[in-house]
Image (cartoon, rainbow, N blue to C red):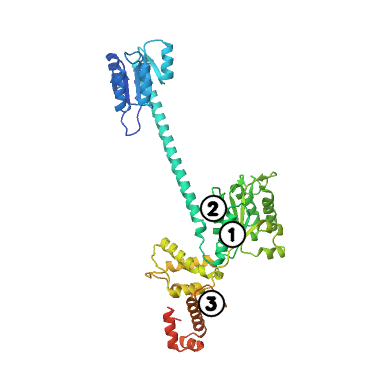
């Protein structure tokens, strides 16, 4: 190595802000210790020891990145020292000084002391500097790799823990206990759900819009043996048939304009899990044939492909249509209907289970309070009467939206009253045909109050004044006012 090359050798740099690397030199000759300290001291923190025992003590208390040991020393040889150094500081790089061409000893040192390299005596200072620099750069890289591996392990562990937590949260969110209802009709629904959840049977969920078919589908999945796998959902009415086919079955690159790459369909994505086909009654005949093939053979064919693929997917479908009538009208395939309807779960409309309205209303009130930072405590008797008497054509979804609207517009109110409801719920747009029907599953006193309220509202809506309404109802105006006050009805009618 030329002097100009040697002059350009700089010491290895530790990470920004850290102290210089620590080096331990072990040799029983003071002159060698002094020479190496002078050679390396300008760039590194150099520690020296005259024996292996002294060197081990320094290793225990100092932060050492590189160990240089003489091969031949009294009491403890260089190889023995380096073997013990591994136990004390396994990450330090090890180098050996040797004045002998003893290949057997060097081989033992390399194998058992795991040395990075050896330096022959006598040495050139610049050669030592270069070897030390390369050794410490290797040490820095190894240290960084260890740190990155540890960080990656920590991240993976956190991700695993988060995945477990999220999976439990999803299972809790879509558990049976999140579907509220105590009416006999809902008890029958729960009974069927519990039984079918333990099987892989295809399920058809029927019911009007807003009854919670999606929630029932998810609850069945997360209560069954496939809960650890994917649950994917597709609204069959949301896409035209050509796009729906690609979404469900996937396509090959070039299958149609814009298909720039292969794409997996939802049936493949849901392999070993569950696919939920919402509004399946809206599919066209061609799509119905393809769905029938999946249900019969468990096979799919990507658009643009000639081969088929086998999938293991549980199918849960839902519809708000009368599929039996659609079959009779040749709008829906009869064979597909019976394939889907292995088990049917029918969710009754809210008007047929009015006894569930109070528990649902309080649940949605708590949910909206938390969402909007409100503290409404409950409903007045009149408000609950109005909720129980309303027909709820939009079912549970409409009830939830109504409660959320009340909470959003509550202002300083601490209780939900009738005046906070929309005109539809308050009956201000004309009483529906069934408005005076007494809910069969309410207590007698509440049913009577509900009937009085609806009759008074209908009379006021029809006549435009309380005086004429009282005449229409056949009672004195004063009695009407007292009754309205007891029922907490608005004076504005």
Q: CA distance from mark 2 to mark 1?
A: 15 Å
* Circle number at residue 222: 2
Q: Position of residue 364 (x, y in %)?
A: 46, 64
Q: CA distance from mark 3 to mark 1?
A: 29 Å
Q: Nearer the viewer, mark 2 or mark 1?
A: 1
Q: Position of residue 306 (x, y in %)?
A: 70, 44
- Up/down of 170 relative to 404, above or below: above
Q: Which residue is mark 1?
A: 192
Q: Nearer the viewer, residue 81 or 446?
A: 446
Write the residue at 51% across / 69% down. Answer: 355
Q: Nearer the viewer, residue 177 or 424?
A: 177
Q: Quadrant location of residue 377?
A: bottom left
Disc nearer the start of the sequence (3/2): 2
* Circle number at residue 212: none
Lateral position of residue 68 relative to residue 347, left or right = left
Q: Nearer the viewer, residue 130 or 445?
A: 445
- Up/down of 30 relative to 170, above or below: above
Q: Which residue is mark 3?
A: 438
Tell me the SS state at disc 3.
Answer: loop
Q: Position of residue 396 (x, y in %)?
A: 52, 66
């Amino acid at each position: 190595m030329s002097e100009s090359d040697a002059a350009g050798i700089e010491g290895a740099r530790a990470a920004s802000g850290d102290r210089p690397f620590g080096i331990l030199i072990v040799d029983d000759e003071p002159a060698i210790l002094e020479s190496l300290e002078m050679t390396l001291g300008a760039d590194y923190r150099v520690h020296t020891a005259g024996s292996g025992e002294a060197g081990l003590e320094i290793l225990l208390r100092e932060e050492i990145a590189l160990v240089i040991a003489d091969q031949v020393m009294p009491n403890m040889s260089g190889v023995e020292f380096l073997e013990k150094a591994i136990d004390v500081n396994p990450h330090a790089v090890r180098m050996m000084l040797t004045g002998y061409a003893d290949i057997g000893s060097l081989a033992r040192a390399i194998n058992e002391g795991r040395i990075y390299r050896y330096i022959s005596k006598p040495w050139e200072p610049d050669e030592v500097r270069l070897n030390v620099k390369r050794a410490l750069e290797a040490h820095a890289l190894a240290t960084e790799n260890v740190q990155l591996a540890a960080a990656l392990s920590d991240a993976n562990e956190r991700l695993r823990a988060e995945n477990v937590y999220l999976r439990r949260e999803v299972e809790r969110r879509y558990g049976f206990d999140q579907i509220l209802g105590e009416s006999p009709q809902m008890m029958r629904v729960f009974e069927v759900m519990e039984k079918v959840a333990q099987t892989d049977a295809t399920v058809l969920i029927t019911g009007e819009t807003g009854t919670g078919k999606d929630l029932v589908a998810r609850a069945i999945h997360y209560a069954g043996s496939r809960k650890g796998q994917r649950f994917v959902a597709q609204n069959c009415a949301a896409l035209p048939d050509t796009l729906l086919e690609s979404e469900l079955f996937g396509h090959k690159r070039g299958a149609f304009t814009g298909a720039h790459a292969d794409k997996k369909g939802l049936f493949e994505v849901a392999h070993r899990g569950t696919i939920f086909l919402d509004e399946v009654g809206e599919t066209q005949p061609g799509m119905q044939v393809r769905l029938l093939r999946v249900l019969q053979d468990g096979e799919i064919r990507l658009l643009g492909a000639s081969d088929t693929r086998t999938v293991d997917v549980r199918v849960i479908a839902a519809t708000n249509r009368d599929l039996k009538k659609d079959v009779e009208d040749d709008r829906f395939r009869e064979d597909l209907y019976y394939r889907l309807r292995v088990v049917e779960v029918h969710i009754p409309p809210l008007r047929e289970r009015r006894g569930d309205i109070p528990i649902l209303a309080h649940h949605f009130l708590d949910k909206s309070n938390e969402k909007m930072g409100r503290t409404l405590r409950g409903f007045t008797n009149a408000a609950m009467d109005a909720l129980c008497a309303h027909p709820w054509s939009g079912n549970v979804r409409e009830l939830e939206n109504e409660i959320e609207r009340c909470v959003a517009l509550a202002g300083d109110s601490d209780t939900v009253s009738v005046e906070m409801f929309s005109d539809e719920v308050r009956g201000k747009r004309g009483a529906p045909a069934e408005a005076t029907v007494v809910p069969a599953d309410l207590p007698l006193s509440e049913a009577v109050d509900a009937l009085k309220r609806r009759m008074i509202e209908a009379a006021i809506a029809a006549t435009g004044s309380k005086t004429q309404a009282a005449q229409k109802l056949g009672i004195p105006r004063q009695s009407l006012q007292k009754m309205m006050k007891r029922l907490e009805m608005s004076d504005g009618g």
